[in-house]
Each structure stands twice: as C-alpha cells, then as structure tokens.
Image (spheres, rainbow, N blue to C red):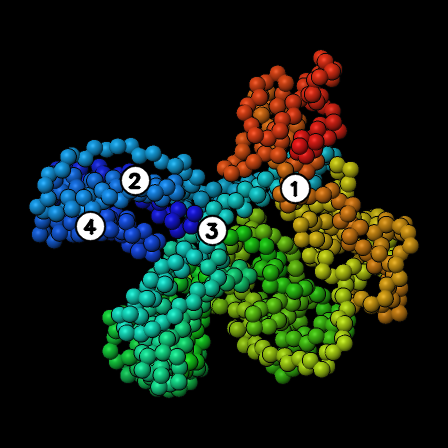
Amino acid sequence: MDDLLEEFIAETRETLEAISGEIVAWESDPADRARLDSIFRFVHTVKGSCGFLDLPRLGRLSHAAEDVLAAVRDGSRVPDTAMVNAVLAIIDRISELVEAIDAGVSLDDTSESLLIAALAPDAKPQVPVSSVPQSRAVSRSVRLNVDLLDHMMSGMSEMVLARNELARRLRDSDSVDPQVEAALERLSLTVADMRDTVTRTRMQKVDALFSALPRMVRDTSAELGKAVHLVIEGADVELDREMIELMRDPLVHIIRNAIDHGIEVPALRRAAGKSETGRLVVSARQSGNQILIEIADDGRGVDVAGIVAKAEQLKLHSAAELAAMSDAAKLELIFAAGLSSRDEVSAISGRGVGMDVVRSNIEQIGGRIVLTNDPGNGLRIVVHVPLTLSILSTIVIGVGTQRFAIARQSIEEIVTVRGDQVRIETIGDASAATVRGRRMPMVSLAPLFGLGSGPPPTLVIVSTREGGYALGVDSVLDTEELVVKPASPAVMATGVYAGKTLPDNGLPMLLLDASGIAAVAGLRFAPVVVHAAAEENVVPGIPALLFDDLDGQRRAIALAVIDRVEAVPVEAIRWSAGAMRLSIGDALIPLYSVGELGNRTEVSVLRLTDGDGEMAYAIADAIEIVELPSEIAPARQAVSGGGGAIAGVVLIAGEPVELVDPHALFAGQPMKLAAPPVCLLQVDGSGWMETFLKPALEASGYRCVTALAAGETAAVTLAMEDAPVRETVAPVVILRRFRNVDGEDDGSIYRYDRPALIAAIAARRAQ
C-alpha cells in the first residue's frame, strides 16, 4: 500500500476513536465552539486528503458534513438531534470506508446518498444512529512520539559509551577470556544494529513532502492564468521525518513564488521565444551528509538591477554600499525583509516579501539556501538540509588543538606531505598541492580557522560537486560513526560547517562541509576538456598502494580494496578464537600479518573491504600510491613470506615488488551472509537455547530468534524433545538432552553434537 495512504488510514482511525464522543458532547452544549471547531477540522482534513489520494466517495461524504458544520459555525443553522444523528451516520460511514480501503475490499455505495440527504434541514427524522463495532484489519504500524525516539537514541549513545569502557578495560587486562571477547563482539554488533534501526525509524521518503505539489501547482497556475509543467525527481530520497515537516511551508512558499513571479504568462513566453507552458523542476538528492532540494524554473529570473534600485529606494543600503556589492550579494537582497522586485504585491506570493522568513526557517534547522540566477531563463534555488539524527561515517582530523569530522563519502584519499610525489607550492597568494603529478587547489585549515600557520603535514583529498581539492590538516586521528545534528544558525552561517555531533568521548565536535570550505576559500573549479584523440588506445593502469611489510619485503595491493590506512595501538591486537583480531571502535575485525609485531607500541594497518566484509592487514609503513604495470609474473606456488596471499611479482621503478592477492585474503575469512537464514528457537524457559545454542549457530552463519518479526519467516525451527512443539510452518529439528537414543526411529539430535546439529539444520533447509 502507498505510504501516504497508510498514513491517512492511521491518522483517520486515531481521530475517529474520539470524534463520535466529541459530537455527542457538542450536541448537549451547542455553544462549545472549541468542540465544533475540532469536529469541523476532522471532516475538513479528510476532505482535503481525499483530493490528492483519489478517494471520491470519502470526499463526497466529508464535504457534505463539512457544509453542515460550516453552517452551524456561521450561525445559519442550529444543531438538533436529527442533524447530529445524520453527522454521526456520516462519521460511521467514513469509518467503514477507511477499514474497507485498508482491507482491500469494496462496499456498496447505495446508502450514501441517503446519508447525505439526511443532513438537509427539512429531512425526515431518521432512526437514531447506533454504534456498531467495525471489523478492523490488524495494524502493522504504530505511531510514536518523536521525543520518544530521541530518548531511545540517547539511550543507545549511553550503551555505546558503556561498551567502549568495557572494551578498554578488557584491553588493559593481562588475560582475557575468549568467551568474554566473543560476547563483547556480539554486544557491539547488536548495539550498532539497534542504533541503525532507531535512526531508520525516523527516516521517511521525501515523496511525503512532494506528493501535494502537483495539485498545488495546478491550482496556483490556473488561478494566475498560466500553464506550468511540474517535474519531480528524487522522491525516493530519505530524510528525517521532523525535517520533512519543517520543510513544508518554506517549500510551498518558494514554489508559489516561482509560479507567480518567475514563470511568465503564455503571451510573454511566446514573445520571448519560449514554450507557452512553463517548466518547474523540483528534485531531491543526497550529497554526503546533506539532502539537496532544488527548485528550478525556466521563467524570467530575478531582475537584479530592479532589486538594487528597490534596496536603495527603501534605504536598506547606501548607493556606495550597493555599488561595492558582488553580483551574488546583490542577488541575495531578495532575502531582505519587505523588499520585492515588484511595485505591486500579488495575493499569491511576493518574491522578496516573506523570503527572509523562508531563509530564517531553513537556517533554524541547520540548512542554507543557494541561488543561481539566469536573467531571462530562470532561477535555481538549492536548499541544503542536514540529515538530522542520521548516522554518518566520518574521519576525525586534528587542526591545532581542535578536532573536526569530515564525511568519508567526500574523501578520496589521505596523503602525507613528503618527497616529490606529494608537495605543496605557493603561486602568488594561493596554494596548490601536487599529488603524484595531479595538481589541485589547496586550503589549509589552520590559517583559515586562525588555529596556526605554516605548511600542513597531511593532505586530505576531498571531492565536491564542483571539483576536487586538497585540505591541509595537522593530523588524522580516528574514524567514527557519528550522529549528525544541525548546529546553531550563527555557526551554520559561516558556510564551512555541515552540523555538529557528539562522538563517543562525549566532547562536542563540528562536522566540516567540504563544498562550503571551498566556497569560503574562494576556490574556482574550471572544467577540464579531454580530447578524445589524445586518449585513443590508452589503457589506464590499476592504482595500488606500495608498502613495506612487517617481514621487510616491499609489497603492493590494489588501492580499490583499501578502505583506509590508520595507526592502531598494538595492545588492540589480540589472538582470540583461533585468529588474530583487531579491536577498534565498536567492532572486532580479523587481522592478517606476515611478520612479528616485535617491540612496537603502534602499528599501521590497512583496513580492507570487499563491499560486504572487512579485515585488517598489518604493515610496517605505507610508501606511496603507484600504477601497476600490465605485466604480472604469477606466483607458481604458495609463498612462505606472504602465507599464500601473493598473486605474483611486478616491476615498479625497476624494483621487483610482490603483489598481494586480496581474493586469497578474503577467501580465508569466515563467510558472512548479507541475509543469514533465520533459526526459530522454541525456548523452554531453562535459558539453555539462548545461552548455549544461539552463539554456536550464529557462529555458523545463522541468525537466531525466539520470536519472528512481522513478515519474517524461519528457515528451520529448533525445539527440545521434552517440550511441546508449537505450531510452525518451518521444518523442525528436535534436540535431545542425552547422548544415547531410545530407538532406531528417533530422528532427534544430541544437543551437544555440533557437527550433526549443523548438518541436520542444513538438511531440513534443503527439504
């Protein structure tokens, strides 16, 4: 069922439970204006929703009831028992239709004309309405207060802090029980999953914001005598539900402005050589940690000269100040309170009148507005909205004594300034960075923020929609999954921040906006023209990271498999559960090493990923990024130094270098399924299944539950032989408590015979 229709049904049900009682109470006290207004708002809301949900029968009933209640409100009709009975009958019929829509069944409409006729002042008295309980489909949704979700999120943050404290204590301990480490790993996965679930419950498709636009555009354009074609793109993008509600009024005002003052009437469009039908595009897309909502029209654009003249006439600025303004600053005068490009103000909207309120409302939720004016061809407005309470993967950097976060999606790579491969040059008053022959503009954060001076030791190569550039930082500290919230308007107005966050250490931290930093620093990105003739027959090489391994051998690995390179304390690496594992953040990940760690207190690791799983590779030092040659001498057999994970040897700068085989690395790791089969445990109250059986099965790639979620099915059910087997559609595996069987026909499995148990589950699944 459509999300909007489900929401309409849920809200209507909720109101219907109380509205009948309100009508009866209002009948006994007709002077109670508050109750009358409440009843009127309900039928008015139902009528309005039916317009764009295409529910004509509900619309006809609610419209009739609304007319009667409107007559009572304006004093032209006095409520009596007959009228109240008729309104109650309408309400009951609305309830029946709502339940029929939810159940997907049809109802006969022959009685609805009689119900509407009974509302007339001269209608014959009807049989008093009796409340008949309606059969209702089982609801799969529940309405929650957003404050409750916020409280749940805060609780999850406290759980993460407690989990990290436990992990630190285990690392500091001289001896750690492998079972305790395994329990900690399961706890970390559960906490991360629950935090993600709480966040996703707040997310909603932007379609909920866009769905009412077609009707509004149609009505507004018809009222103004214009023809407008609306195009909606990106309705599947998800945004925090609260942000959607806060964006409704600003979006409506901007669109009405575009139709009224932006798009011309057909005669003027013909004279300008345009199509008589104006084009209005409303789109949404995600850019890193923000949602960009764009409204673009092909109308006349903004008359900047007229805006400037109006500002001078209203004495908002002096003539000298206006002359010194940049084109962008002059365009933003439309946000000045009371300023409009027109002498007359339309009843629909006023570009300039109210735009200051629109910008203020958007800034209050941590957003910003960017204008692009093309006189004679239209105006493009892009609203940048933060992903409130969305978990974002970030890299934490250090600048001076401060810490900041950058969204990982915007980071291409992180390099250290050294040698000829990575260098910084000063050209006039601007800085540029050259990374392996690629020159790009550079912004050093310390001078920009007033936190220091001098060349930065580390460059973070970031990519924006306009282009890529190097961000100079003092250090790269950590990687964290963070909850992003909007910062105050004063902070967001600087243009360099995308929000604030509270990491697990409890110290607030600001999130940097890569595009905003580029704009504030005055970077200009020119498009690069590539000549096809010069690119013919050129086969690009595969980029790889060249590094020194722990055994002293120089090796390389494809760059695409590396998520990041970071230094970790050796104490975070332990041998547990039969493998080397790295405890970092909220996770325990397998670690591969071909040499001894020795007396090191810190070691560099490559965080590798294949898109589904993750592992670490301990190295001595990362050298540089190189391009692999097309010729590779394959390894003939397992190489002792590389532990069989060497694909071959390549020549780089005349030196033989072993090439690490990522396929072999991941092939040696336990398989993790994206959607593991579900085992339903029919627990008997003893706690044995939850304590003993569940960890063993989940270590074998299954997911164990004691109750199925809505719509979830089990691959197999497990039950004890001395407990009643509850009804289930999944195949059943019976467990017995004793090793010996009573007879040859006993199909049960001894509960501690792990190989037989896993084999039996696999066999039942295959049936």
Q: Which of 698 and 222 is in front in this view?
A: 222
| Spatial CA span between label 2 and label 3 | 31 Å
Of the numbered discs 4 and 2, the one sitting upstream in the chain is: 4
Which mark is nearer the camera, 4 or 3?
4
Give the foreground label among 1 and 3.
3
Q: Where is residue 590 in the image (x, y as percent from the top left)?
A: 73, 45
Up-down: is 96 above or below 614? above
- What is the CA distance from the residue labelled 1 to the residue labelled 3? 33 Å
Left or right: where 466 falls relative to 553 = left
Question: Residue 168 — which label?
Answer: 1
For mark 1, give the secondary structure: helix
**Residue at left offset 15%, top offset 34%:** 128
Could you say where residue 175 lies in the image, as x and y percent from the top left?
74, 34
Q: Which of marks 2 and 3 is in front?
A: 2
Q: Is residue 136 above or below residue 226?
A: above
Inter-mark Cα distance, 4 to 3 = 36 Å
The structure residue drawn at horizontal position 89% and vertical position 50%, both measured from the top left corner, is: 638
* Label drawn at residue 96: 2
Residues 467 and 600: in front is 467
The numbered mark, 2 or 3, whose residue comes first in the sequence reads 2
Say what amino acid the circle numbered 1 marks: Arg
Q: In which quarter of the image is the C terminus?
A: top right
Instruction: For label 1, count other residues whose C-alpha is less than 10 Å away and answer few (under 14), some (14-19) or many (20+).
Output: few
- Say the numbered circle drawn on residue 64: 4
Mark 3 residue element: strand
Give me the C-alpha separation between circle 4 and circle 2: 17 Å
The label shown at residue 203 is: 3
Mark 3 closeness class: few <14, some 14–19, many ≥20 residues within 10 Å: many
Q: Which of marks 2 and 1 is in front?
A: 2
In the shown orientation, is residue 308 left or right of residue 725?
left
Disc 4 or 3, which lies upstream in sequence? 4
- Residue 509 is situated, as x and y percent measured from the top left of the image, at 54, 56
